[in-house]
Structure formats: C-alpha cells, structure tokens
Image (tube, rainbow, N blue to C red):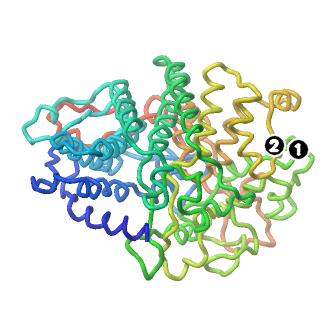
Amino acid sequence: MKKIKFLIITFFSVLMLTSCDLSLDRFPETNLSDVNFWQNEANFRMACNQFQSLVNANDIIYDDNRSDYATGNVLNNISDGSRVVPSTSSDWSKPYEMIFTANKIIEKSNLVQFEGINRWQAEARFWRAYAYFQLVKKYGDVPLVLRVLDVKDPEFTDGRKDREVVIQQIYDDLDFSTENLPSFQQLGQTEYGRISKSASLALKSRVALYVGTHQKFHHWGESATHLQLSINASEAVMAEGHSLYNDMSYYHLFQLDGEGFTNKENILAIVYGQNLVNSIRSHNIGRELENGYASVTRAMIEQYLCTDGLPFDKSLLAEWPEKTPWSIFKNKDPRMQATIFTEGEPFGSPSSYIWNLPAIRTRFSPKKYSIVADWSSRQSFVDIALIRYAEILLNYAEAVFEKDNMISDDDLDKSINLLRDRVSMPRISNLFVSSNSLDMRTEIRRERSVELAQEGFRYDDIIRWKIAENVLSKRLIGVTFFEDIYTGSVNVTNDGYILVQDSSSRKFDPERDYLYPIPVRDISLSEGTIHQNPKW
C-alpha cells in the first residue's frame, strides 16, 4: 500500500503542476497559484510528489547508449558524433521544468510558518540541485533562476551564469537539504521513495566527484577542494547505516526482490506501482531491452575480470580465443552473468534467450530490470534505483585516489573490496596491482564500469575523465562471429567480431563535443543574451 498511496498523490500532483510551455524564455508560474493551497503540510507534501514523475527512468537505463559501452537498435548520434544543433530539446527544458516547480514550492514555503515546513523546502532544493547538475554536465554555463518569474523579470535576459556559480548553488541547496531532511531510517517503509538526508549527501558525493575530476583532467579550477567534498559526503553517507544488498548473485538487486525499505542499498529509488491490478504508473524497460533498445558492446564486456581478479588478456582462466559465443562468460566476475543474458536463460520472446536474436545488435543483451513475467503485459512496476550505496563506495575510492594519486589498502577495504566481497571476487590491494603490472586508476574505473553497468554513468564518466575522444572514435563491436550459429545478413570485422559501426563512421571533436549544443529556440528567445557553445 505504500506505493499506491504515494503514487495516487503523485498522479494528482502531476495534473495540478503541468504547464504547457516548458522553455526557459517565458516559463509562467505553475498552476498551483491558489493561496488556500499553500497553507498546510499535506499540500506541500503533495506538491513535492511531482518531482519523481519528472525523472524519466528510461533516460537512466538508456543513457549508456551515448557511450562506447552500449548501443541501441538505432545508432546514437551523440555516441557517433553525428548530432546537429536541435531546435528544441528536453535535455534543456525538462531540468528547467523541475527547477521552476522547485522554485514555486520554495517561494511558498517561505511565506508560511508551521513545524516541518523546512523538510518540504529541503526536498524542493534537492531536486533543484539535481536538475542544475544535469544542465551543468551537458551545457557548462547555464541561466541560474532561483525564484518564480514573471514574464517581465530581468532573469529572462540575464544570460548564462558561470558554471562555478551554479555549482556553488547546487552545494548550497544540498547543504540545506542535508540539514533539514529526515534520515532514511526515520522515513522507514511508509515513506520509502522520499528524499532522505543520505540521498542529499549522496548527490553531493556524486556532484563533487564529477566537478573535481572534470577540473583535474580538463585543467580548470581547484580539483582537490571538490574531491575532498566528495570524500566528506561519501563518508557521511557511510555513517548513515546503509549497506549493500545481501545477494551473492547481485541479480536480484534489480528485480522485485530488491524493492522497498529492506534493501538498504537503494538510497533513492524511482517508485512505481505494484501490479496490473494496482496500476498507477509503470514502465516498459524490460521489454524494450529485449527488443534491442540497448545492447552491450564488446568494450563493456572486456571490462569484466576473470575469477582470479585479472583481466581476460592477462588471466590463464579466460578461454581465448572463444570456442562458443557464451564461453566469454567462463570463469568471469559473477556480475557479468547477472547483467547480461546468456544462451538458454528464460526470456520474453522467444521464451529462452538465443544468441542469434537480430534485434540485439551486439548479441549481448542486458538484463538489469528485465522481468520475464512482464513481457506479455508490457508493463513493469519494478523500482529503478536513482542512487544506490554501491555508487557511494565507488565515489569514495575514486575521490581518494584522484586527490592524492594514491589510495591505501584500508580505503580499498572500506569501498571497492566490499563490492567484490559481495560477489566473491578477489580483493584488490596495492600489492596485487603492482605484482600483476596493473594500474590502480584503471582498476578503480573498471570496478565502476562493472558495478554500475547499464545504469547511465558511462557517458558522464568519459566526459569528466576527458577520454571521450579516445573511446568514442573506436568501432562498436559485439560477440565473436560463428558462421554455424548466426543466420541472415551480418557485418563482420576482419578479426571476427560482429560489427555494429566502423570507426570510420564515428568521431568526437574535443573542441566542440564536450558540451551539448543549446537549442536554437532558446537562443532565439533569449533576446541575444544566451550564446551557443563553442563550434556548434
């Protein structure tokens, strides 16, 4: 019942808050203008319910299609460098929809006095910070709007604020949220899915790691300051009582078994309905994955270590060259089979997975959030994790290493090695890395890729590490081609892999593509104060 109550209110709030024009240039006040509405805690709670509906779960799952680790049944124009300046874009408008909704709630909360009002302002400020982070990552400098605007207000023509100013506002919002939100333990089962103190700290951990590493590798700002903020926020989350989901296979973390308050790993989840009978809203991610909306590339597959803790090209346990398509799973990190379908597993259509599915362009089909029972109904109600504790452990390890260019075994044990313990993989140490001629930065990044595979992190990672021009210009390939298994027309590389896209059709301009192009309509409506990003 916790989900149904939460989502009925959410649905009602969507109807009340929706506006017909979401662009920055002339965004009006939301329709929640009735003075009588903003008088009690129940209505502020209702208004804050709107935010989860503004987060698109599909964007999270399919975001890796922008990178080198996944591809869809249609090639992604960000990944291959073929995109052009759009007329309009939800990448620009949707965050501002969230920001203006937050501003409305914040403004109204300042006009009333009752116990608990700061909590709802804190929720709104969390989501405002979340939205501005999406904008800064993609566009750099962006207009900073912190109040409800009238069409004549000067903010409409103020232009873009320096990203450092926007980042500081993000930190200010998250610090306020941290001080005024309940702990996740206080929320409990009845308020599962709401914003907690640890969610606010976790988002700060994510933002500060992004900014600190972006500064370090793009050579701007004081990276150590932000990396220390990420360390501090990560440690604060660690002290909140979260833990990794206790499942050795890792698979059930992304199934119905992993839902709810008993899963202390999900710091913030996008909450859906319960089933077809109690259906308020749902998603169709599982079926879309099985139809090839996303498939994993060879570049991602090669990140998985063998069970001796070594990469496939160093380990004696790897079957190389492969004798069958599925022998690549032999003696590998269990997270690989928990994340990718293998031959004969229960599937939607056909009823068991086969390697010759033409919809799956690489033949590596991801199975996080894919539930076979939801195939026929085309509706799934499994919650999608927006922030989970595993990410915080990874953020901590990376921030520690990048701040000092080293990490102690103790810090590895309190972060990455907890993830490896869960799936019975060998622990990493400085001695293990040096003895096997490995590189610590590479292994920290590898662990992030494997643990967070197909959860929307890869593109942001290659942007902040400034390696996009190296990895996105490479070919996209899939499984090893076996002539006796695959039927129909398929392109094959000279070295025997299924070819999705050759390197000759892929490009990344480092002077242009590290930022998104601003939509033409928003530039034109800004009266000349918003200028396009370089070289677009």
In the image, is residue 525 above or below residue 46? above
Q: 507 or 154, which lies in front?
A: 154
- Image quadrant assignment for residue 117: top left
- Image quadrant assignment for residue 524: top left
Image location of residue 384, percent across then percent down: 51, 59
Count the labels in the image. 2
Question: Quick one: SS at disc 2?
Answer: loop
Q: Quadrant of the C terminus?
A: top left
In the image, is residue 40 above or below residue 24? below
Residue for badge 2: 311
Position of 228 with respect to 45 (left or right) is right
Q: Name the residue at 19% across, 30% down.
A: 529
Per the model, the C-alpha gap separating discs 1 and 2 is: 6 Å
Residue for badge 1: 315
Outermost residue to the left: 152
Position of 13 with respect to 331 (left or right) is left
Of the residues shown, which amino acid type is indicated by label 1? Ser
Position of 33 with respect to 457 (left or right) is left
In the image, is residue 5 above or below residue 217? below
Q: 408 or 321, which lies in front?
A: 408
Is label 1 in contact with label 2 (beta carbons under 8 Å)? yes
Of the residues shown, which amino acid type is indicated by label 2? Pro
Q: Name the residue at 14% across, 40% down.
A: 149
- Image quadrant assignment for residue 506: top right
Image location of residue 286, percent across then percent down: 55, 69
Q: 159 or 122, which lies in front?
A: 122
Q: Residues within 10 Å of mark 1 (few under 14, many from 20)?
A: some
